[in-house]
Amino acid sequence: MTQQQALDILKTGANVFLTGEPGSGKTYTVNQYVAWLREHGVEPAITASTGIAATHIAGMTIHSWSGIGVKRWLSEEDLDHIVQKEHVARRIRKTHVLIIDEVSMLSSDTLAMVDAVCREVRRDGRPFGGMQVVLVGDFFQLPPINAASPRAAASDTLFSDETPESPFAFSGEVWRRLNPLVCYLTEQHRQEDTAFLDILSAMRRGAVTREHEELLLARRGEPAEDVPVLFPHNANVDRVNDAALAKLSGTERRFSMERTGPDVLTDALVRGCLSPESLALKEGARVMFTKNNPAAGFANGTLGVVVGFDHGAPAVETRENGTISVEPMEWAVEENGKVRAKITQLPLRLAWAITVHKSQGMSLDAAHIDLSRAFEYGQGYVALSRVRSLSGLTLAGLNQRALEVHPEILERDATFREESEAAARTFHELPEKEIAAMHERFLKAVGGSVDVLSEEAQRSAKTAREDPTKATLVLLREGKSLDDIAKARERKSSTIITHLDQLREAGHISLGDVAHLARGREADIEAAHGAFAALGTEKLAPIFAKLGGRVPYETLHLARVLFLLGENA
């Protein structure tokens, strides 16, 4: 199926599974569809199965969007609790089009939980409460993590798919009820090497020959300078990163993680945190951000280089958003609205080498890949398909598992192709006027404009999406509290404070605009102001240390905004 055929199907409002080989234009097609929706006044919810994948599409994880978080099943009580979260319920109610990228890494259980939440919030028994669902991905990519975990008590009502024999999203009842049209893209836009493309296609068919293996083995060699290295295992990644750091001249600076709360909870936070407990940096170090902060110019997966240290804080130069002064951030466990445990660390890790898992979604001119210890179906395929041609590839090693894809996917892929061909034939036979009428009916059904919005209206909508500080400013001048602004904007309080800092730097707010935000934190803010004056610094880390760690970084950040506005008043 071509990209245009897939777009015509998407515009009808049908539920769709958009798939195809790497480089076939899945992301491009989704972006074209999103642009069309926005031209007609419809704002889709853009999500992904993982944080890394979400950064590639400027969206959020489906777990955060739906409010399910890290849960592996939902009881009736869990479902009621999620539905009571007004910010979650509000965004689900207003969503007409839900896009889920990298669906291959989403289990059938997770898909079932999202479906249950959407149906409950929208009071609509149709799949996902009747919204259009666009599933995007390639099941030849890495499969979902299917770690065993205990089920809830048998007496509980569970919202999940009981399909332990298969981890894939398509294996569950929710996929069957959703019944998405399959759009299997067949054009190729990434790989520039026909021999290399033939190898990848053979891997997808389970038909790798000795000749294919020899072509790959001929690429064994040492990595070129400044070429990223991909490994299946974290241990190898750490070894390469540590060696590269040691080669840099200059003073090493070490940043230690701080913990607050019971060990059992902070230990779990540390295990799930991409930032290390002890992070060593030097000027010239290649790094990757490990947490999302779009307002500050980075997301989980953003790459950069340390270009210096600003009062102790690393300054990281990124390709997209220039140089960012990186402050510590928090990872927390909350219960009943209260923080029970948290860890604090710079949202960075070294990145000369990365795992195959984190490379998913990248498109590289060159890479050095070690597949000698590949252990998961699809790992080799994901790693190799990141590179555009054989000439850009060097291999450190290759084992048999690296050439294998999941046998269940081989079988299901043939079905997907057949379903896609049938859908293409059906739409090819429809008159253009009838397809256009279907597009028009869909736009009317979701409250969109049949006519393309004026350029001014599109600019206004784009500004609202890309400059979140404007919406924050409106609420701020209405005298709303920090918590109320965060709730209305569906953001964390720390993000709203970052908006305030940006508004301050742009000269859009005065001390009078924000003074009311200090209510309830007066003592801590006064102590922070005294520390700012005593140390003569605007950096938060030394203030945090001087106050003995008793004042949270969020409060210190707000105190700095007030302090700097007061100085300039």
Image (spheres, grey):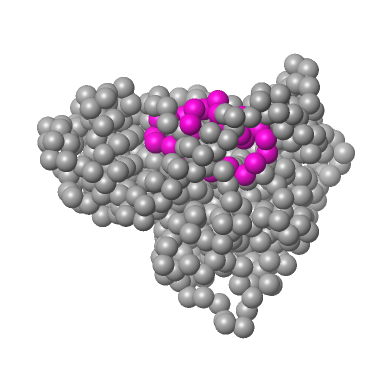
Viewed as shown, does residue 440 lie left or right of 553? right
Viewed as shown, does residue 105 lie left or right of 370? right
Q: Measuring 26% from the left and 25% from the top, which residue is drawn there?
A: 194
Viewed as shown, does residue 558 lie left or right of 366? right
Give how far across and how far down residue 415 sits, in percent: 43, 48
Q: How many marks?
A: 0
Residue sitting nearer the eye, 362 or 439: 439
Q: Is residue 535 visible?
A: no
Q: Quadrant of the rendered structure where residue 186 is? A: top left
Give how far across and how far down residue 141 sits, in percent: 38, 45
Q: Quadrant of the rendered structure where residue 375 is? A: bottom left
Give how far across and how far down residue 419 sits, in percent: 49, 43
Residue sitting nearer the eye, 91 or 247: 91
Residue sitting nearer the eye, 86 or 438: 438
Q: Quadrant of the C terminus?
A: top right
Query: Is residue 4 found inside the magenta-colored segment of the image?
Result: yes
Extreme residue in the front direction: 429
Above or below, 226 relative to 260: above
Q: Measuring 69% from the left and 72% from the top, which residue is drawn there?
A: 77
Q: Measuring 67% from the left and 44% from the top, which residue is drawn there?
A: 132
Q: Is residue 391 visible?
A: yes
Query: Is residue 479 found inside the magenta-colored segment of the image?
Result: no
Viewed as shown, does residue 256 lie left or right of 117? left
Q: Quadrant of the rendered structure where residue 133 is? A: top right
Residue sitting nearer the eye, 103 or 83: 103
Extreme residue in the top direction: 455
Above or below, 219 relative to 559: above
Above or below, 289 relative to 144: above
Q: Measuring 71% from the left and 56% from the top, which residue is drawn there?
A: 126
Give how far across and how far down residue 159 sits, in percent: 61, 68
State the extent of the magenta-drawn residues as a range.
Answer: 1-26
